[in-house]
Image: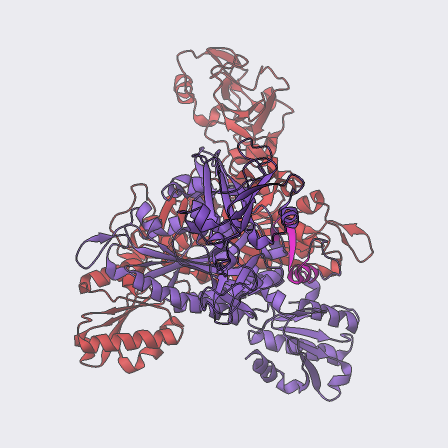
Chain colours: A purple, B red
Amino acid sequence: MLLSKLCSLRTKECPADAKMKSHQLMIRAGYMKQVANGIYTLTALGQRACLNIENIIREEMNKLDGQEVKFPVVMPKELWDLSGRYSSIGSEMVRFEDRNNHKMLLGMTHEEASVHLAKNWITSYTQLPFMIYQIQTKFRDEPRSRGGLIRVREFTMKDAYSFHDSNESLNKYYEKMHDAYMNIYKRIGLKNFISVKSDTGMMGGSVAHEFMSINDFGEDEIVLCDCGYRSNQEVAECVFEEISNEESNGEISKVFTAQAKTIDEICKLLNYDLKHCIKAVAYAVKGEDSIVLSFIRGDKEVNEAKLKKITGKDIVPVSLESDSRFFAGNIGPIGLNLNENLIVVYDYSLKNSVNMVCGANEAEYHLINVSISRDLPNINFCDVAKVKEGDICPMCKSNRVKIVHGIEIGNIFQLGTKYTKSMDMRVKSSDETEFNPIMGCYGIGIGRNLACVIEDNNDEFGIKMPISIAPYKVHICPLRLDNENVNSVSNSIYELLESEGIDCLFDDRNVSAGTKFSDADLIGMPIRIVISPKSLENNCVEIKNRMTGDVSKVNVDNILEAIKDLIK
Amino acid sequence: MLLSKLCSLRTKECPADAKMKSHQLMIRAGYMKQVANGIYTLTALGQRACLNIENIIREEMNKLDGQEVKFPVVMPKELWDLSGRYSSIGSEMVRFEDRNNHKMLLGMTHEEASVHLAKNWITSYTQLPFMIYQIQTKFRDEPRSRGGLIRVREFTMKDAYSFHDSNESLNKYYEKMHDAYMNIYKRIGLKNFISVKSDTGMMGGSVAHEFMSINDFGEDEIVLCDCGYRSNQEVAECVFEEISNEESNGEISKVFTAQAKTIDEICKLLNYDLKHCIKAVAYAVKGEDSIVLSFIRGDKEVNEAKLKKITGKDIVPVSLESDSRFFAGNIGPIGLNLNENLIVVYDYSLKNSVNMVCGANEAEYHLINVSISRDLPNINFCDVAKVKEGDICPMCKSNRVKIVHGIEIGNIFQLGTKYTKSMDMRVKSSDETEFNPIMGCYGIGIGRNLACVIEDNNDEFGIKMPISIAPYKVHICPLRLDNENVNSVSNSIYELLESEGIDCLFDDRNVSAGTKFSDADLIGMPIRIVISPKSLENNCVEIKNRMTGDVSKVNVDNILEAIKDLIK
């Protein structure tokens, strides 16, 4: 490919909101161009890298006997009504009416489509297990797109679906898929990634893992322990010492606290620490008149994902200032006016606590000396707290956990029979009885992985493309193309490499060596060949490895061999 | 791939509306499954064949220095407003509002997106010409989907866009692209295809060609001549003998024709032939109160596409029975009440005609003895007639044309500057003046081509997949897998071929030889290997070429070589 004809641009400018290196570099090196909020066109640089990632994924899926299929992007409402997801998924799913007023949607995932395909075709347990996958465009109307390809509205995704006759079969396959994913990340050039337990979210099912690229810009919090424990914050169990061995200071008493408004002010006023506060955190339930009240120790934060799961409600934080049913700022577990529109959840952090302060459910008053087991017997505790750096590891129960940020680069789910049951897919077992196959599903976004690879592989000068996914393996930089020798040697090398199937960028522009080098650094192809009048005096060219920075001189006659060695 | 695990089905049943062989066979052999009207899921059989077609197209595009990019499926209205196509395209384009009430659409083609990408990046004539292309899902809300993959609503398409600094450059590239397309069709296994001149339709521009797979079920009419002339009926020039050397029977006279209603009855009543009738064909203009009246010789039909182009109006056939401005059934060119809402077009077939009959623009009366040049001097004739089998060839002007039916399998357009002008893409020429680049665009649908390949390659037993696009090259049929020798030899062959990168279907089912053979015929993989206890007595297996029917015995030790030879 001649660089002069490449429909792309190298620039020093990038959008003000581009905080992440990958976002900046993909714009500056001309890998993509924004079309609308969260919607990009990929240039040949971006798309060829994505195609290489796709092919690596394809290889790994085929190794697991995956069958590549293609489901439709546009599907009818009826298909998604079967699983109930047409109505349960919010406005991130695009819905429209076709010319005949049929309700249609743009598929976000393809569980329904995969069961539709397999149903009535797969009828015997002897046909199980099998796995089908596709690589295709998806559109999700994300409320907040950000970070270039990190969070977009339109993206290419590999999604896979496996069908099994037993949990044992699913577990075995799930493990293999887990390994295949780790293999994919390694092969495409990611450096710092892990798998963590995760929430099953809108997919349903029980077991799920996310793969995370460790990155300070990541929106996910990951809880880690040296013992090997890894979990997404959303599902990480919170473990810490109870305050149970304290002696009680005596009976509950009510104190006047009008002068203190915040929890910190209360602590200061009453000379309590946060660990001795019972904090009330309120949430409104979407589409209902209900309130979820969560009582939690003052030094802890509520994990909304856990609270959602425990209550089974779609909740949003709410202020109760204008709610006449509550004394906002003075809400506490004792003397609370319970009713059917109020769901109360107590976090484990309160269990066996003594000498606590809490709201008195009366304006301007708090209660002190509250002992949970004495004053609030018979209540159930749940785990709704966020894990904090330094909390006890829930697995080894001895180490203290660390918290890092990560970007989700893939996920795998054990779905169970949610979709085969609701869509009535039945298969005959060996004893002729019928059962609903157990499913797994496995997703990986192509563009986001490319962005994460660039996050992990760059320097102050630009991108360092791993050779496995580089859009072009070799960047040929002839200096002084007006020199006949340089011109003819450069073109011979270009033709030779291309004829051997090694894709090259050829900088045919009449610009300075400095511009050629800085552009080559920015674009980041893994191997650079510099052909100059000087090096040709010894019949040599210079080869630079962009990843390592290593430079070597190679005789023109040995160039193919040298390049092939580097590619290996 | 084990046949028992293939998520697919072989069946004798197919939908009642499946008239075309390819539609029947792709359903019966389990290449696809319908999800909704004009929307299909492709199984591994269908998708792998499509991927092979895509790769052949990719190779041909890359040979022309094409840069593979990826444009978004979902685009904002604003982008399409620039070209005016957001409003000019009808309900076949899907429009919806995103969560922020922004108007969005599903892209049908990507001229706007390609100019958006190139604009501001390509700034000098030295960067021209270049070509960008993508292979991606498109959704068009077709009013009538039909014929399986022949006319669907969702499909995968390769669309390419080239940019030039002169018509000469475009012409040169257009020719190369034309050849590349012909090469693609040959390589994927189409047998009977041609390129024809065509209408530019909604794309704008001047020169255009369609590639047609000749097929009786095709909806397009193609005009052919032995001299090499080929044209889509829509743009084919109509040439025939004028009736000019006849002597006039005298002056016009009005005759009473109340008893005759149709043109045939008029002819019978007055003893005229169709060639001596002036037929009036009426059209309403969409969105206007206007009428287009086309006068044409009685033995000719109006070509709506031509009439649309000439009038520049979007027209639909209309009956004037209830229109008080006209005497329906008695409309003629003489004494017609002309006004601004009436557009009258005279077809060339009337030029110099004598002794014609036409409506008198008066109820129950016709005129006879009309001589066009005498009675209607100074009128302009246009070519609005459909070409008929046996008409004079417009190119060689001597042979008679044939008419065949075809399925459009690709199209190429010279777009001119329609999009670069409306989107203000400017490039500097060598003298520093600015110009709008000239564009070409080039489309080919993947699934429709697969269907046409199957149309051209099948027999009573099923599909004959060309080896270039076959989902699996080899179908291994072991007979009696319970025989230890058959089992071990079959599995060795399977492993050997797969390890050499030759994808195989392995029929591991415990079914009769008859079922295995008929399924293999139906699915249609190009090479079949039959391993039976009997043939193994001589250490041989049987190889069958599905395309030719040739059968040969091959020693087990030479199997790899034999298969490689066949693939070549």
| Residue positioned 24% across, 59% down in the render | A125
A60 relative to B348, above or below:
below
| Residue positioned 47% across, 31% down in the render | B300
Answer left or right for A208 relative to A1.
left
The magenta segment is A19-40
Answer left or right for A118 relative to B382.
left
> Where does the image place residue A199, in percent across and percent down from the top left?
45, 55
Is any part of residue B409 visible from this angle? no
Nearer-the-camera pick, A130 or B271: A130
Is any part of residue A276 visible from this angle? yes
> Where does the image place residue A134, in percent across and percent down from the top left?
44, 57
Nearer-the-camera pick, A333 or B58: A333
Q: Quadrant of the N terminus of chain B?
A: bottom left
**Quarter of the rendering containing residue B173:** bottom right
Q: Quadrant of the C terminus of chain B?
A: bottom left
**Quarter of the rendering containing residue B544:** bottom left
| Residue positioned 76% across, 78% down in the render | A484
> Where does the image place residue B11, in percent across and percent down from the top left?
25, 52
B253 relative to B59, above or below:
above
How many numbered badges does the structure rendering display?
0
In magenta stretch: residue B463: no
> Where does the image place residue B198, in percent across and percent down from the top left?
54, 45
In this view, the residue farthest toward the bottom is A538
A135 relative to B223, above or below:
below
Nearer-the-camera pick, B155 or B57: B155
